[in-house]
Amino acid sequence: MSKIKVMDEALANKIAAGEVVERVVSIVKELIENAIDAKADTITIELKESGLREIKITDNGIGMNNEDVKLAFLRHATSKIYDDDDLFNINTLGFRGEALPSIASISEVEVKTCPKDSELGTYLHIKGGKTLSEEQVAANPGTSFKISNLFYNTPARLKHLSSSYAELANVIDYVNKIALSYTNIRFKLTNDDKELLSTNGSGNLLKVINSIYGLNIAKKMVEIAGENDDYKIKGYISLPEVTRSSKSHMTTIVNGRVVRNSTLYKSINEAYSNYKEDTRYPICVILIETDPSLLDVNIHPSKLDIRFSNFDELNHLIKETIDNSIKDKLLIPNITIPEVELPKYENITLNIERETSEEYKNKLTDLINFKVAETDVNYNEDEADIKSEVIITEEGEKLPELYPVALLLGTYIVCENDEGIYLIDQHAAKERCNYEKVSDALSHPNKNVISPLVPIVIELPQDEIITLNENKDIFDELNISYEEFGTSAIRIITHPTWFTEGKEVEIMHSIIEMILNKGKDFTLAKFRDNLAKMVACKMSIKANTYIDKPSMESLINDLRKCKNPYNCPHGRPAIIHFSIYELEKMFHRSI
Ligand SMILES: Nc1ncnc2c1ncn2[C@@H]1O[C@H](COP(=O)(O)OP(=O)(O)OP(=O)(O)O)[C@@H](O)[C@H]1O
Ligand SMILES: [Mg+2]
């Protein structure tokens, strides 16, 4: 007798559910996506006990007729693609015809739906994939799903659910991101009747950013827009002074789909890397539009990731667009006294990992309470215009006129002008100037070299000398020539002119160390950049060095000439600003 049997549909659905429905947010995501595909412009998500007890999603979309709603729960039943060609030209969020049967196989589903032109709608009640009742009922146009008893028949899954706090955090994160993607749709999210998000469907992205992150962040977002033959991108990215320690506030939306794509995050982050430290990430909402045939949307079970067919084009566009949008902005962080503000959505770590700590729970409780309080007072958001605080600079003028007054703690140059007080970190500023100088010298190498008067001899073990000999081409690129000197040393014959006097040996040691430790992903451009950073740091004045006023002036002048005078090459700020307004506020002299 044959051992192989085709499994029945209920079992197949339950297995598929293992991939599609992992947690509360998976259900919320699938149902919201269906509502969007059904062209709804109002979508309400009501949770009970973070969705663990009940998830209700109501939309005013096209609805389903009696026949379709029953078909919708069959595996591979979809109205979205009909043939192979459609699979390579997907314009909808769903296409697999899997979500509803999967959800219905591991929970209890009640659906009420009614097409726009129909008097009567359909009510279906399904549990574990079996229809318990079906009725014709009076209903509003659109569809409403109620999901309860989640994972009642898959105890292992039920056990795997995180704390209600973590489940809710993930739902908030997802709904926020989808609200950022569909600014024309009115979204409302509640948990146990507490409102967590409400957007007005006005189509204004900055207003949605405001409802999620608050006014202080919205005011510090820079608009970006750019296009090339294949891609069109637009959105907002935060000023470098507003960065976060995780990538979770980078929202990327491709053809209306919220995606988590590490190469995309990397590209955005690199575009921004001149302005911030490596471990910080911007808050951004970036919408990417492209021909669907350039995407493979079918590579992830929950459709959370996609594959681009010519990513290089997109990568280039992202870098160029972000750079263009930031480069004419005055990027001196303005120090503001924080208003007493309760934590907002972005202050909680929306970790995909399961998170149960007390601190985390408290943060989330604050968040939930805050949202309720906020909607009471802040309802006029619709009318209120979000005034951007981003200042655009005149062409070529990156820093205002600054008059140095004194040096504090051997580190900070105090300057003043009509706009208030500025503090310049002299080490960071010097490092920036040196970095740009060395970068320039490295990318436009001239053949001018120096033969050191005092021989530079560097002792090294034989194996390292062999490694250096293998990398002679890098030394050639840098215009450095050397010869072996005895059995365990090399002697530098010539080096480029940009080596700082007195620091030659130190610089040579660093170059050798970098060559010996060069990793697999070595590129000459990256090597040059790291070299410029390292040399800049070695050449710069350290903190705690007292310099006189003419030296301060000349440093400020050099800084003014830099392409990016705002940060040291490692992304730390070189200059900060206390405006007269903020100073007066601090001393209670105004308002
Ligand atoms: N809210 C809704 N309004 C109108 N029609 C809906 C709604 N939800 C589901 N449907 C219909 O039910 C069908 C099945 O939905 P389901 O989510 O299972 O599959 P899908 O969206 O086609 O693909 P995927 O599995 O990728 O989500 C859809 O193709 C759509 O025709
Ligand atoms: Mg779907």
Image: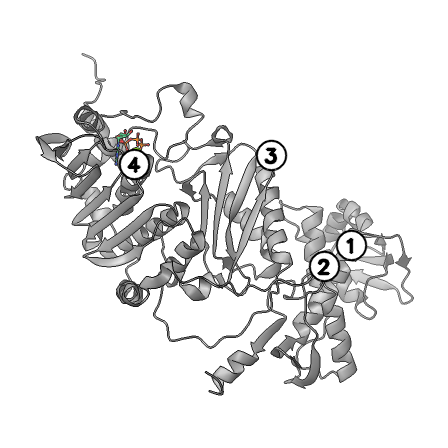
Q: Nearer the viewer, residue 557 or 582?
A: 582
Q: Are marks 3 and 1 in contact (CB under 8 Å)?
A: no
Q: Of the residues under marks 3 and 1, which one precedes in the sequence?
A: 3
Q: Nearer the viewer, residue 454 or 536?
A: 536
Quarter holding the C terminus is bottom left
Q: CA distance from mark 2 to mark 4?
A: 52 Å
Q: CA distance from mark 2 to mark 3?
A: 35 Å
Residue 121 lies left or right of residue 297; in this view the side is left
**Amino acid type, callout 2:** Ala
Q: Residue at x 22, y 55 (%)?
A: 191
From the image, state whether disc 2 or disc 3 is nearer to you.
3
Q: CA distance from mark 1 to mark 4?
A: 54 Å
Q: Which residue is mark 3?
A: 229
From the image, state whether disc 2 or disc 4 is nearer to you.
4
Tag 4's secondary structure?
helix
Q: Is mark 4 within 8 Å of ligand 1?
A: yes
Q: Of the residues under marks 1 and 4, which one precedes in the sequence?
A: 4
Q: Of the residues under marks 4 and 3, which one precedes in the sequence?
A: 4
Residue 176 image offset from top left, x and y in percent: 36, 52
Tag 1's secondary structure?
helix
**Amino acid type, callout 1:** Leu
